[in-house]
Image: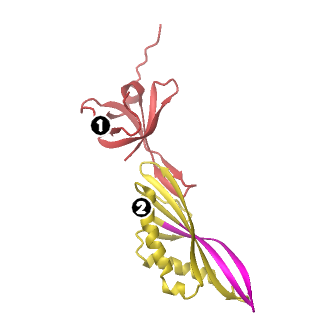
Amino acid sequence: MAFAEDLQVYLQDFGVPARLTADAPGSEKLVLLDEPDAEIFGGEQVAGDKIITYVADDFPGLVSGVQITVDGVAWKVRGAPQRLDDGRFARAGLKK
Amino acid sequence: MTIAEHILQHIYQALLTGNIGASVYRARTDSFALSELPAVNLKPATEGTRTLGNGLKANELDIELDVHVADTPPDGKADEVISIMHAAITTYAPLLEMVAEISYQSREWEFDEGDEQRGKVTVRYTVTYDRLSTVL
């Protein structure tokens, strides 16, 4: 018998609401928002990054260039989202 | 102080007074944060000498100006800074009085992306000046 895992448990504590900007308000799902800084140009600049981790099935329309509102702030998806491990979670970079 | 250092100080001053639309630094090694951009980092690269005869030498001082920007597109923003920067350097009278030539050589573009599009454009110049062989 397959074990039905509740993936939302992983997002409950630190998740923030997000929805594709084109979708109606109220359709938000939880995502994890990470904002690490990274050195670029061999350490000559420091750039902030914005990355969301989400349940892949929650955002089937999330592709490069799509607008997404995360915790009330509008972003654009940067590059192709990447599925993690067994593919049930995915990660996408964001940009203004 | 050597002539090369004197020239670098003049270039730095030309950039500071030239309203180039960017902060100016000399050989800065710390990272630039988003809030500090646009910024220009002036660095000497190499220097060589040619013998002219009669105790005269011609020195060629290669310098690099790294233009750091965050914009879309980053190269467009950098170009605004570069065009003003070029005018500032090539018209700064105290500098022109002590060198034979300031010659633009090349540009190199680099791009990266985070929450903002970032760019770094390295602009290279060669400054030629004559000196007595006994003076550096």
Task: Label the yellow chain with its letter.
Answer: B
What is the magenta range? B40-65
Q: Residue at x 47, y 10 (%)?
A: A2
Task: Label the red chain with its letter.
Answer: A
Q: Is residue B58 magenta?
A: yes
- Disc 2 designates what residue? B77
Vertical relation: B83 (above or below) A88 = below
Q: Residue at x 40, y 54 (%)?
A: B72
Chain assignment, label 2: B
Vertical relation: B49 (above or below) A93 = below
Chain assignment, label 1: A
Q: Amino acid at mark 1?
A: Thr
Q: Nearer the viewer, residue A90 or B112?
A: B112
Q: Residue at x 48, y 25 (%)?
A: A87
Disc 1 from disc 2: Cα separation: 29 Å
Its colouring scheme is: by chain
- The percent coordinates of residue B56 (x first, y second) are 72, 89
Could you say which disc has been placed on residue A21 in the image? 1
Question: Residue A20 is drawn in which quadrant?
Answer: top left
Callout 2: SS: helix
In this rendering, does residue A27 appear at all?
yes
- The percent coordinates of residue A84 (x first, y second) are 50, 29
Q: Nearer the viewer, residue B96 or A89?
A: B96
Q: Are marks 1 and 2 in contact (CB under 8 Å)?
A: no
